[in-house]
Image (cartoon, rainbow, N blue to C red):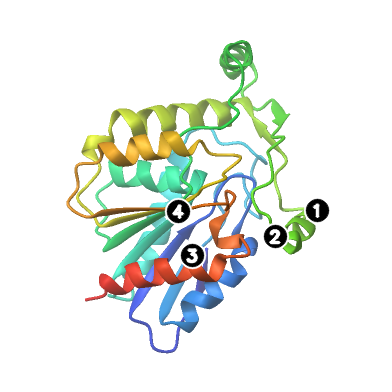
């Protein structure tokens, strides 16, 4: 767990990164948040980044929920408004945490949340993964993900980064699939917390139609969906990231008491 503090903080952001990445890819966002008056609490999820007991593997999605709870408890120490920001699989983990745990947060921001995949494994591969999950759950396969950003600097940065996970276990995939299904099934039980969804219009990884389907079924009093035409999956790493940040900052400011 890492903490970055702002000199005159008015709130705290708990950031949850996505799959195959880690806190090191969020330097720009962390700096922007601390500059405009927010502390930031973040770390690496189990099996990711600098925290791999087994790289690209978790025994249960509950490991992510437990980790987010720990970051949340650290954020509570400041006695300031708390904002949960989850990207991709981190967004899915935030959804699951809000469904399974009683967290008092002031607002939630989801960046291209993983509620469906553009290129899911075939039915045959899915069936094979189900079998392998019972026999060799730590067996890993290449992710072969499409580009998440159009930013050449970020793509170059990731090429030689040893903390980028490039293979995931069949158990990890099994747990991800179950979490996505459960999030859709339980959508109407999502707590009544202000929510902002930021979605890349040209997302090559997450199926934006599944994101909008989930969003439209929410029965909460305050929700906003902003799709960014032309942007890829990582909206906070795209060339237009300043515009994306401005929307996120304005939303948080609305909920600073």
Which sits earlier in the primary sequence, circle 2 or circle 1? 2
* Residue 62, image x, y percentages: 43, 38
Residue at mark 2 to residue at mark 1: CA–CA distance: 13 Å
Residue picked out by circle 1: 159
**Dot in front, 2 or 1:** 2
Residue at mark 3 to residue at mark 1: CA–CA distance: 25 Å
**Dot in front, 3 or 4:** 3
Which sits earlier in the primary sequence, circle 3 or circle 2? 2
Which sits earlier in the primary sequence, circle 2 or circle 4? 4
Q: Which residue is drawn at the image coordinates 59% and 50% (left, top)?
A: 232
Q: Nearer the viewer, residue 220 or 243?
A: 243
Tag 3 secondary structure: helix
Residue picked out by circle 4: 86
Residue picked out by circle 2: 151
Residue 96 image label: none
Q: Nearer the viewer, residue 132 or 184?
A: 184
Tag 4 secondary structure: strand
Residue picked out by circle 3: 244
């Amino acid at each position: 767990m890492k903490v970055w503090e702002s000199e005159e903080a008015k709130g705290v952001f708990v950031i949850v990164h996505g799959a195959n990445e880690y806190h090191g890819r969020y330097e720009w966002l962390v700096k922007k948040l601390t500059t405009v008056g927010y502390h930031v609490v973040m770390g690496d999820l189990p099996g990711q980044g600098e925290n791999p007991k087994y790289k690209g593997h978790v025994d249960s999605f509950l490991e992510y929920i437990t980790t987010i709870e720990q970051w949340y408890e650290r954020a509570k120490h400041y006695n300031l408004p708390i904002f949960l920001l989850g990207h991709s699989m981190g967004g899915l983990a935030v959804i699951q945490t809000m469904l399974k745990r009683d967290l008092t947060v002031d607002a939630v921001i989801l960046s291209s949340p993983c509620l469906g995949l553009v290129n899911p494994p075939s039915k045959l591969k899915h069936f094979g993964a189900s079998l392998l999950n019972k026999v060799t759950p730590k067996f890993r396969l290449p992710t072969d993900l499409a580009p998440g950003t159009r930013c050449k600097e970020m793509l170059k940065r990731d090429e030689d980064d040893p903390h980028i996970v490039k293979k995931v276990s069949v158990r990890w995939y099994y747990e991800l699939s179950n979490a996505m299904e459960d999030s859709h099934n339980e959508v109407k039980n999502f707590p009544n917390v202000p929510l902002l969804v930021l979605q890349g219009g040209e997302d090559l990884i997450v199926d934006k139609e599944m994101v909008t389907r989930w969003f439209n079924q929410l029965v909460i009093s305050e929700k906003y969906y902003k799709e960014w035409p032309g942007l890829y999956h990582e909206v906070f790493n795209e060339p237009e990231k300043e515009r994306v940040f401005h929307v996120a900052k304005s939303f948080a400011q609305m909920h600073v008491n």
